[in-house]
Image: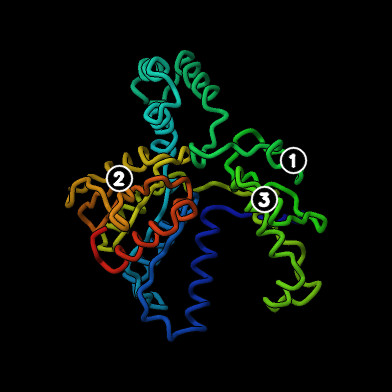
Amino acid sequence: MDQGYQSSDTKAVKQILIFLKKWFDEHPEFLSNPLYIAGDSYSGKIVPTVTSEIAIGKQVGSEPNYNLKGYLVGNPVTDPFFDKPSKIPFSHGMGLISDEMYEAYMKRCNAGDNSRQSIECTNSIDAIDECIKDICSNHVLEPLCTDDSIHHHKLKPKLNLGAREMLQRQEYNADTEIRLSEISSQCRAEGYIMSGTWANNDKVREALGIRKGTVPLWSRCDFDIPYTFDIPSTVKYHLDVTTRGYRSLVYSGDHDLVVPFIGTQAWIKSLNFSVVDEWRPWFVDGQVAGFTRSYSNNLTFATVKGGGHTAPEYMPRQCFAMFERWVSGDPL
């Protein structure tokens, strides 16, 4: 029986490694350039794993010999043991749930240990979920985009899907056109639709050298492809790469409810690295742009003040300054 295309975390890692090898084989003049692997959000599963594979390959003399320097990840999906429970203390700290709701959760769920949930613990979590269901999880200060707020594109997302996933699930067709005047300033997600309009425009395709009729309609992501989530945690890959001497920057938009900075700090703490530079603000143009802490093994953590789930999308100038300083080896 013929099987359709399937993908997975590990397959994505292998595909990236194959791509890198082919690209550098064709462009060897760039091989001596410093190489950093980077990504946001679910790339937290892919980036550390790819970096670890490259580091191992360098150790055993694999070709090509990349000039690997390190990696960076933003609001990275890392490990459900750390990521998932952090949403509740984050919600409490942001004033989204009451003291009583938080205290009941801590009492009934063994101080936030969700590994063994009682009925009382589950009820507390359900009550919290119900309370914050109308909050935009990608950025808690922004409006929640629902099918009503994007009605003219007939999107019908599950309530409070991440904005990117919501747009990825839409069906793009040739009749889906959007004018700049139609984009609502209230709803960031509407702007994402423009990628489909742009990529499926005949003039754009011609400029990109795509022969007419060779590529079907482009969509941001095909959720019909079977996908196996087979990398449950990347903590061990972070540990592997950093203890090999490679540099790492982990940053978090501090208004993200999808992967809150609290959980990210927790798994970094689990690495048991000593603190080299204590918690302090970092600045752009004389204003606080976030807070940072540096650890042994060349690991830097930073928050991006006002940033959401994909911090550079919300705070591009601050994130570029952060990256420019870090990649140059300067303190944030």
Question: In which quadrant is the N terminus drawn?
Answer: bottom right
Tag 3 residue: 183
The count of marks equals: 3
**Amino acid under disc 3:** Ile
Tag 2 residue: 268
The residue most toward the bottom is: 29
**Residue at position x 67%, y 53% in the image:** 193
Of labels 2 and 3, the one closer to you: 3
Give the alpha-carbon distance from disc 2 to disc 3, as whole Å. Answer: 39 Å
Residue 90 vertical placement versus 279 (above, below): above
Q: Position of residue 69 (x, y in %)?
A: 32, 68
Q: Which mark is residue 60?
A: none
**Amino acid under disc 1:** His
Give the alpha-carbon distance from disc 3 to disc 1, as whole Å. Answer: 12 Å
Q: Nearer the viewer, residue 119 or 284?
A: 284
Give the alpha-carbon distance from disc 1 to disc 2, as whole Å. Answer: 42 Å
Q: Is residue 208 visible?
A: yes
* Residue at disc 3, secondary structure: loop
Of labels 1 and 2, the one closer to you: 1
Q: Position of residue 4 (x, y in %)?
A: 72, 55
* Residue at disc 2, secondary structure: helix
Question: In which quadrant is the C terminus drawn?
Answer: bottom left
**Residue at position x 43%, y 47% in the image:** 307
Q: Is residue 45 visible?
A: no
Q: Position of residue 250 (x, y in %)?
A: 35, 52
Residue 266 vertical placement versus 296 (above, below): above
Tag 1 residue: 151
Residue 218 vertical placement versus 171 (above, below): below
